[in-house]
């Protein structure tokens, strides 16, 4: 049976844009990288505020795209050691150019977050903005983020809410995995974060858009303890 309705994944313009968001390539990918900067400025800024980067910390950003959040981190904490991974060579190039002033303080690599090239417990903090849509359903990527965090280390992850995404013609199921509050929580618990050490905040964006900012701490020991409100006070202004 054939359909005359435009379909996600049918090679139409929307599907092609979805694929570029998932893995920017070529001239169109570079163009999209430039578009992402103003489009994602607010969630990136809020995520970096929640990350609260400090001098001396080792920080990883996964799926950094054009590198806007990397610039915000460097501005907030010039003394941190900043690493990043993105599967798009075009985005690595854009992000390097955008943050060229950081010089050797910045280590950006082309690679896949299903198999991070760092040892366990390597980072104090990990950032993932607008990238969880592309995590595998089996949870490999999410477990990698937990693995490379040191005990007591912090993950900050942002996704736009599934209901907001459903209003767009973009973000079809062929390329994007969508999340509501319970989905983000479940994904992080499956990755290894204790439920009591995950805090989810609803984020309001322009034009009635809504998102979820998750802050999760890797447990210091195997027993589950509740987040101490005093510990998270510095990041309470998301
Ligand atoms: C929608 S963009 C978001 C970019 C940036 N974080 C922002 O908010 O502006 C998603 C980025 O994640 C990268 N990405 C998606 N899946 C990935 C994977 N499995 N491994 C590495 N990078 C991935 C893409 O190449 C793209 O640059």
Image (cartoon, rainbow, N blue to C red):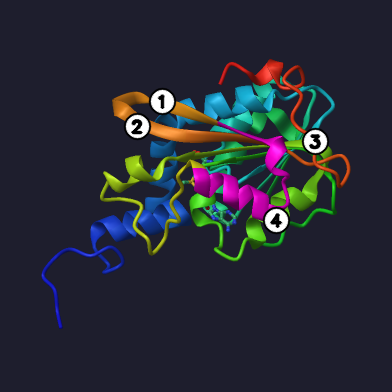
In contact (CB < 8 Å): disc 1 and disc 3: no
Part of the protein shown in magenta: 182-200
Q: Which mark is residue 143?
A: 4
Q: Decide which of tag 2 and tag 3 comes sooner along the chain.
A: 2
Task: State the residue lying farthest toward the left.
Answer: 4
Q: Which mark is residue 209?
A: 2
Q: How far across and down, in percent of the image, does residue 10 sit?
A: 26, 69
* Disc 4 to disc 1, C-alpha distance: 28 Å
- Whether residue 111 is visible: no
Secondary element at image label 1: strand
Q: Does the magenta stretch include residue 188?
A: yes
Reply above or below: 57 against 66.
above
* Disc 1 to disc 3, C-alpha distance: 29 Å
> Mark 3 near ligand 1 (CB under 8 Å)?
no
In contact (CB < 8 Å): disc 2 and disc 1: yes
Camera-nearest label, 1 or 3: 3
Secondary element at image label 4: helix
> Mark 1 near ligand 1 (CB under 8 Å)?
no
Q: Residue under circle 3?
A: 225
User: Residue placed at 61% from the left, 27% from the top?
Assistant: 48
Reply above or below: 17 against 165.
below
Task: State the residue lying farthest toward the bottom.
Answer: 1
User: Residue placed at 76% from the left, 24% from the top?
Assistant: 228
User: Residue placed at 64% from the left, 48% from the top?
Assistant: 188
Q: In which image quadrant can residue 54 be found?
A: top right
Camera-nearest label, 3 or 4: 3
* Disc 2 to disc 3, C-alpha distance: 33 Å
Q: Residue under circle 1?
A: 204
Q: How far across and down, in percent of the image, does residue 3 sit?
A: 13, 73
């Amino acid at each position: 049976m054939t359909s005359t309705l435009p379909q996600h994944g049918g090679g139409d313009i929307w599907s092609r844009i979805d694929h570029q968001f998932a893995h920017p390539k070529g001239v169109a990918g570079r163009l999209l990288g430039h578009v992402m900067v103003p489009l994602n400025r607010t969630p990136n800024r809020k995520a970096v505020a929640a990350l609260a980067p400090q001098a001396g910390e080792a920080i990883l950003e996964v799926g950094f795209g054009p590198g806007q959040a990397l610039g915000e981190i460097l501005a907030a904490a010039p003394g941190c050691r900043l690493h990043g991974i993105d599967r798009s060579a075009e985005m690595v190039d854009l992000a390097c150019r955008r943050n060229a002033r950081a010089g050797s303080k910045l280590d950006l690599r082309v690679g896949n977050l299903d198999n991070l090239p760092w040892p366990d417990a390597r980072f104090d903090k990990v950032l993932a903005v607008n990238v969880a849509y592309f995590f595998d359903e089996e949870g490999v990527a999410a477990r990698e983020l937990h693995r490379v965090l040191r005990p007591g280390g912090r993950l900050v992850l942002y996704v736009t809410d599934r209901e907001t995404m459903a209003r767009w013609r973009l973000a079809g199921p062929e390329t994007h995995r969508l999340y509501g509050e319970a989905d983000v929580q479940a994904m992080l618990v499956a990755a290894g974060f204790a439920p009591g050490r995950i805090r989810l905040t609803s984020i309001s964006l322009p034009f009635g858009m809504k998102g979820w900012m998750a802050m999760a701490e890797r447990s210091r020991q195997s027993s589950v303890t509740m987040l101490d409100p005093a510990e998270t006070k510095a990041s309470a202004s998301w």
